[in-house]
Amino acid sequence: MTLLQATQQAFELLLGGDAALWNIIGVSLRVSTLALICAVPPAVAMGFALATFTFPGRRVLVVLLQTLLALPTVVIGLIMYLLLSRQGVLGAWHWLFTQQAMILGQAVLAFPILAAMTLSAVQSVDKRAAETAKTLGAGRMQAMWTVLLEARFAVLVAITTGFGRVLSEIGCAMMVGGNIAGVTRNITTAIALETSKGEFAQGIALGVVLVALALAVNFTMAFFQGKGLTR
């Protein structure tokens, strides 16, 4: 099969509503979205705390956060596998090779990105924003919320980046999910499997979906930031 024929077949699969293909896409979107929902609140809170407060061990936490950004996804996958295996600390949960394990692993992957970018976003906010809010009678929590509102677009960019990270990773999903058809097989693991088998049509179709999702997320962010697509 030529590349042109494989590409044509890929679009036929997409437009024809191939059940297996769309199930894979659904698994990816569901797992990545739930992972992000789990990771955003604690990561944003940690990023805000590191940017706002001074306390013992703060520098160590910042360095640790920056180190986690550089860890390969397969290393995170290995750690999660060991924790979730029968002999692991979390073995009693029986989550290994389930979507729950993938959600947990991807939440761990997204956390350092979200926290580090929130830290940077909050640090870039004019310090007078919180002081002005307090002067106008705002409490501590209201002042914190004011700062987050000032940094909202940068935080949204962090969330977008985190979503792109978990949606496109393969190492962790493969190790803790097991690439089980109809259950834990997502876009990236399916692309790797189908390509290794020489079935390029489904791999191309899923690659097209992955690129389309990335473009959709980034264009949406550009729209909300008021930049427009022509600037």
Image (spheres, helix red, strand yellow):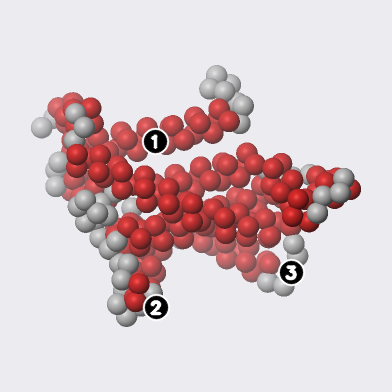
Label 3 crowd (10 A; few <14 / some 14-19 / many >=20) = few
Residue 149 visible to an observer of this rendering? yes
Residue position for label 2 = 89
**Residue 129 x %, y %:** 80, 44
At label 3, the amino acid type is: Phe
| Residue 193 x/y as whole percent | 20, 49
Residue extending farthest to the left is 1
Residue at 27% x, 55% y: name it.
184
Residue type, mark 1 in image: Leu
Q: Describe residue 144's horizontal placement relative to residue 62 as left or right.
A: right
Closer to the camera in the image, 117 or 220: 220
Whether the residues at callouts 2 and 1 have beta carbons within 8 Å, the answer is no
Residue 133 at what x, y percent from top left?
Answer: 83, 46
The residue tagged 1 is 213
The amino acid on which the numbered mark 2 sits, given as a three-letter code, is Val
Residue 224 quadrant: top right
Q: Looking at the image, is 83 positioned above or below residue 220?
A: below
In 3D space, how far apart are the residues under numbered discs 2 and 1 (Cα atoms)?
A: 35 Å
Residue 19 in the figure: left or right of residue 160: left
Which one is earlier in the sequence, the residue at label 2 or at label 1? 2
Q: In which quarter of the image is the N terminus?
A: top left
Q: What element carries label 3?
A: loop
Question: Residue at 23% across / 27% down in the picture?
Answer: 15
